[in-house]
Amino acid sequence: MPSHSFRSARFLTSAATPAQLPPDRGAEVAFAGRSNAGKSSALNALCGQRGLARTSRTPGRTQLLNVFALDAERRLVDLPGYGYAKVPEAMRAQWRRSIDAYLRERQSLNGVVLIMDSRHPLTEFDRQMLDFCRARPLAVQVLLTKADKLGRGEATRTLARVRAECAAQGWPAGVQLFSAVAGTGLDEARTALAALLGL
């Protein structure tokens, strides 16, 4: 999948609730993952735009569903990061409700790009997201990010372990190594993303 298809991505809107999102038509892919797993960096690398998704972890940004348009009918949706934001529990509960409603009700949602830190994959949240996507069902592409921080042997073992777990659990996921810094897995991830969007 040529990268220029994603270089056209532009920020469209931020939504506090699914009701504030653009009309539910066309095709969307959601990016999900823990706040520190490299979600924004992955999105920026895939689109070839350093500043598309903000990589700072300010609560005012992470509480929103951030929508990026590729064209009139295709969008990427950056979901609030799960985990480390220092905000009241009531606000975290609101994020969970918004994400849950979006994932359950959004008809244009074709799949999820699930970001996992390759050094700490398959957290409780990751497993919950994979369980949900299996039940709906939604296709998933798992990016094992920060792969540049692992040695080659360790990276290979991690990839095999996560793939084996996904197969054993029946999770509908493709799994790959990824590094926004080194460019590892960019072409593979773009090809998977294009397929999810029907490009």
Image: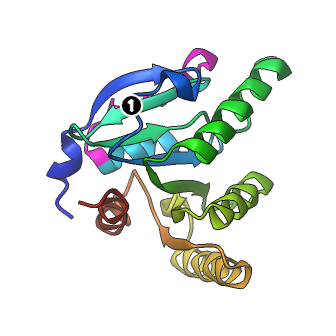
Q: Position of residue 12 (x, y in %)?
A: 33, 25
Q: Tell me which residue sits at (22%, 37%) in the image.
A: 72
Residue 1 falls within the magenta-colored stretch: no
Instruction: Name the residue beneath numbered marker 1.
Output: 23
Q: Is residue 33 visible?
A: no
Residue 49 falls within the magenta-colored stretch: yes
Q: Quick check: 137 left or right of 190?
A: right
Q: Quick check: 159 left or right of 73?
A: right
Q: Tell me which residue sits at (23%, 60%) in the image.
A: 199
Q: Tell me which residue sits at (80%, 56%) in the image.
A: 124
Q: Position of residue 54 (x, y in %)?
A: 44, 27
Residue range in magenta is: 47-61
Neighbourhood count class around disc 1 (C-alpha, 10 Å): few under 14, some 14–19, many 20 upward: few
Q: Position of residue 16 (x, y in %)?
A: 57, 20
Q: Position of residue 78 (x, y in %)?
A: 48, 37
Give the quadrant of the N terminus.
Answer: bottom left
